[in-house]
Image (cartoon, rainbow, N blue to C red):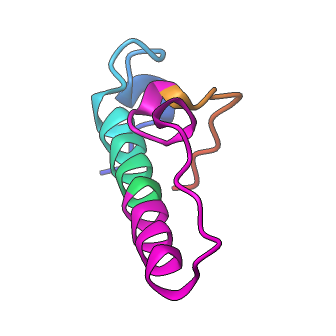
Amino acid sequence: MEPRTFGEQTRNGTQMDFYDDLLNKAVKSIEERFRRRLAGGLLTSRAAVLPAQSQQVTDKTDFELITWLVIR
């Protein structure tokens, strides 16, 4: 059985649930890393500053998706 094309698999981009989930996982990973680095900086430096909540990554809407690159 031959694999389906990306267009067939996503119904020409209208069914992007699988790829949307991957994007959510990537954003969550970025957020967690940001928080770990921030906490580490606060523990090791008196000069560390907490960024405003509006400058922190909290949701995938904090990013602008420019294009998709899918490698299968």
Left or right of residue 66, residue 31 in this image: left
Q: Which residue is found at the position 69% from the left and 30% from the top?
A: 67
- Give the image location of residue 28, x and y in percent: 35, 51
Left or right of residue 41, residue 21 in this image: left
| Residue 21 location, quadrant | top left
- Give the image location of residue 9, x and y in percent: 36, 30
In the rendered image, the residue lying farthest to the bottom is 44
Q: Is residue 43 magenta?
A: yes
Q: Is residue 58 magenta?
A: yes
Which one is nearer the viewer's eye here, 5 or 46?
A: 46
Q: Which residue is found at the position 63% from the left and 26% from the top?
A: 64
> What residue range appears in magenta?
32-61
In the rendered image, the residue lying farthest to the front is 46
Which one is nearer the viewer's eye here, 12 or 3?
A: 12
Q: Main secondary structure of the magenta part?
A: helix
Give the answer, above or below, for where 36 lies relative to 60.
Answer: below
Left or right of residue 69, residue 38 in this image: left
Left or right of residue 57, residue 3 in this image: left
Which one is nearer the viewer's eye here, 39 or 71?
A: 39
Give the answer, above or below, for where 69 lies relative to 43.
Answer: above
